[in-house]
Amino acid sequence: MSPVNSEALFERAKKVAPGGVHSPVRSFKGLDRCPVFFKSAQGAYLTSVEDKKYIDFCQSFGPLILGHLDEEVKEKVHSMVDTAWTFGAAEIYSLDLAEWITSRVPFVEKLRFTSSGTEAVMSTLRVARAATGRKKILKFEGCYHGHLDALLVKAGSGLAGVAAASSAGITPETALQTLTLPLDNEEMLHELFAREGHEIAAVIIEPLPANYGLLIQRPEFLQTVAAVAKKYGTLLIFDEVISGFRVARGGMAQILDIVPDLVTYGKIIGGGFPVGCYGGRLDLMNLVAPLGPVYQAGTLSGNPIGMVAGLETLKKMERLDGWNVLNARTEKFVKKLNANFNQMNNGLIVDQFASLFWIRKNNSNSQPLRALESISPEQAPLFKNLFLKSLDAGLYLAPNAYEVGFASMAHSDEIFNQTIQIITEASKI
Ligand SMILES: *Cc1c(COP(=O)(O)O)cnc(C)c1O
């Protein structure tokens, strides 16, 4: 019998799946290392097939705000598994979660559950086009919105605003319907809207861009995006798949006090199960089938296991004042880490917002980066070194230089302190 180890499993996996994985970042591409194959998880820890235990600051890229296998969530999931797996019919579980969300986030007047963040985003674009009768969508470089064709675009080489496909298999016609702008640039925003604002159905933005590093925006920039959209009759979509119910109960919309027309959620609202959601203004959501003409559906949408896991996660966060507790712990952790980096003068810095953090090359002024083009070309090699040394020492960070870290309620002070030691040691030059 062949030994069970990550190398052997990766060889098998590469034969049956592209790159051996079912989502690209999992493959450790560019890190010159075989991905670790895991077999179990608990709290802040992952256990590999080699029986090595890792502190996990990836947390499945964000959904697990309580950590792996939280006891209370687990109890709800077990009881749901014993009750029903899926109905494909009207049921009470999605109703409970929908009522919880709409009662906590006032601008979400109605919502629809999907099975992923991508589907939720895709559906908002359809609603926006139906509502406005316009074709174009505006997105920002450095924001990720899932893998739908319309938003897998990057800045084109020609006219400002014109996009090109960022993936093979997307038609130029599709890419041309999406405009792109850099973040943090009011001037280009005003120019683009003056030129074609009346053709733009929606502007979509991650109010906390956290998929290409952590690009914390000036509130004034986001306020300007909202104001300009309003002026031109363009709908504002906040993609809060990563920030929703993580940075605060009401997400970035609450922190910024900006009311988007539509919002998308995912990750945390499924408590670790596949759930997405879009919602917002009543008149817009009333356009969705079966009430209105915008078709959108899903065989497993509102899956009861995800619904109860998500609801218990959110209720527990509320009960524990989880957002304040977790944000304070993460801030303390990042401060200590930055103090160490500073003392070592190792050229690294950690940016933090709520329970998200990003270790990056410090480009001397120590200000958080706000736009994609500010990221240092040294980011990837620096991260690779840090990542591999940390991994060997038992710390699992998201395996990519542009992915952020996610803290969870399962990360105790002791675990945070151990992590500081590991990262400090790994980042010595
Ligand atoms: C993760 C993410 C998505 C995509 O969600 P999936 O569930 O992976 O399809 C969309 N937008 C943002 C901001 C995300 O972080």
Image (cartoon, grey):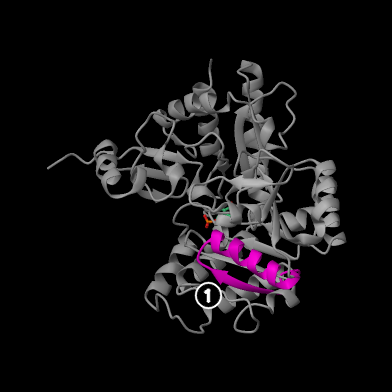
Q: Residue at x 87, y 60 (%)?
A: 231
Q: Residue at x 22, y 41 (%)?
A: 4
- Percent position (x, y) of residue 37? 33, 43
Q: Residue at x 63, y 53 (%)?
A: 246
Task: List the single residue furthest toward the left.
Answer: 1
Q: Is mark 1 within 8 Å of ligand 1?
A: no
Label 1 is placed on what type of residue? Ala
- Looking at the rendering, the stretch of residues picked out in magenta corresponds to 106-132
Q: Locate the N terminus and report the quarter of the image it occupies.
A: top left
- Percent position (x, y) of residue 368? 72, 33
Judge whether residue 257 can be spotted in this image. no
- Percent position (x, y) of residue 250? 71, 60
Q: Quadrant of ligand 1?
A: bottom right
Count of labels in the image: 1
**Nearer to me, 22 or 353:** 22
- Percent position (x, y) of residue 300? 45, 72
Left or right placement of residue 165 versus residue 217 in this view: left
Q: Is residue 130 magenta?
A: yes
**Nearer to me, 26 or 145:** 145
Judged from the image, the secondary structure of the residue bearing numbered disc 1 is loop
**Nearer to me, 193 or 271:** 193
Q: Is residue 393 magenta?
A: no
Left or right placement of residue 77 versus residue 181 in this view: left
Left or right placement of residue 258 versus residue 90 in this view: right
Indicate the quadrant where residue 268 lies. bottom right
Height in image: 377 above or below 125?
A: above
Q: Which residue is mark 1?
A: 297
Left or right placement of residue 133 versus residue 313 in this view: right
Q: Dot 1, how many residues are within 10 Å of its Cα: few (below 14), some (14-19), or many (20+)? A: some
Q: Residue at x 55, y 37 (%)?
A: 416
Judge whether residue 140 can be spotted in this image. yes
